[in-house]
């Protein structure tokens, strides 16, 4: 790793490596990274609307529709019309979808441990602080002008 390599390039490579490692682990359980995103939100709160999931995942309507169709085909979720607004679809986990949670929840933690496990608590705290600050700098950039 070159000393003059941009920090953003290193962060991009790290993010890619983390995502690829996680995606590989998820594939062993028969789901993709995108499908895990949907399931993760449903494990936290079942019965979200299709639009809520689309917003949370920051994807297009066609993308969430495809993800939900595949998860439904795999028997992990089902959709039903909202009882108050029949035009709205609510998404629920099947027993199989619920049973998958404990099998994959630890994967992200394991990968983080693999990547950052040899960091001291101080290094971990400092890295978290610096990355959070950089993210804040970029997300508030437009607000200052």
Image (spheres, rainbow, N blue to C red):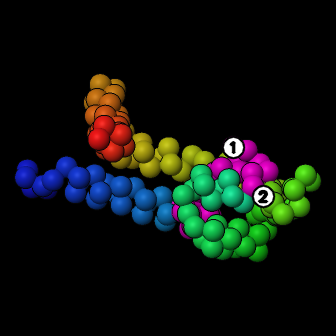
Which numbered marker is on residue 44?
Answer: 1
Q: From the viewer's perspective, is 6 left or right of 133?
A: left
Residue 68: x percent and y percent?
Answer: 70, 68
Q: Looking at the rendering, in which quadrant would you find the N terminus?
A: bottom left
Q: From the viewer's perspective, is 94 left or right of 39?
A: right
Magenta highlight: main SS: helix
In the image, is residue 111 part of the stretch drawn in magenta?
A: no
Give the crowd class for mark 1: few <14, some 14-19, many >=20 residues within 10 Å: few
Residue 27: x percent and y percent?
Answer: 56, 68
Residue 75 higher or lower than 7, as above or below = below
Circle 2 sits in a helix, a strand or a loop, which is it? strand
Q: Looking at the rendering, in which quadrant would you find the C terminus?
A: top left
Residue 94: x percent and y percent?
Answer: 82, 58
Q: Earlier in the sequence, mark 2 or mark 1?
A: 1
x 89%, y 61%: residue: 86
Dividing the picture into quadrants, the one containing residue 87 is bottom right
- Is 90 or 102 nearer to us in this picture? 90
Residue 117 shows in the view: yes
Residue 63 higher or lower than 116, as above or below = below
Residue that carries the numbered disc 2 in the rendered image: 91
Look at the image and give the residue range highlighted in magenta: 25-49
Mark 2 to mark 1 CA distance (whole Å): 12 Å
Residue 103: x percent and y percent?
Answer: 65, 52
């Amino acid at each position: 790793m070159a000393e003059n390599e941009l920090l953003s390039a290193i962060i991009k490579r790290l993010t890619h490596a983390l995502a690829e490692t996680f995606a590989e682990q998820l594939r062993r359980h028969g789901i993709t990274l995108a499908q895990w995103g949907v399931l993760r939100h449903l494990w936290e709160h079942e019965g979200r609307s299709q639009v809520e999931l689309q917003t949370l995942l920051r994807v297009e309507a066609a993308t969430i529709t495809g993800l939900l169709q595949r998860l439904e085909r795999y028997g992990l979720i089902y959709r039903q019309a909202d009882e108050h607004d029949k035009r709205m679809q609510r998404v629920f986990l099947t027993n199989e979808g619920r049973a998958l949670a404990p099998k994959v929840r630890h994967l992200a933690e394991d990968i983080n441990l693999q990547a950052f496990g040899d960091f001291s608590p101080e290094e971990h705290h400092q890295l978290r602080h610096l990355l959070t600050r950089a993210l804040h700098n970029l997300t508030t950039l437009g607000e200052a002008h």
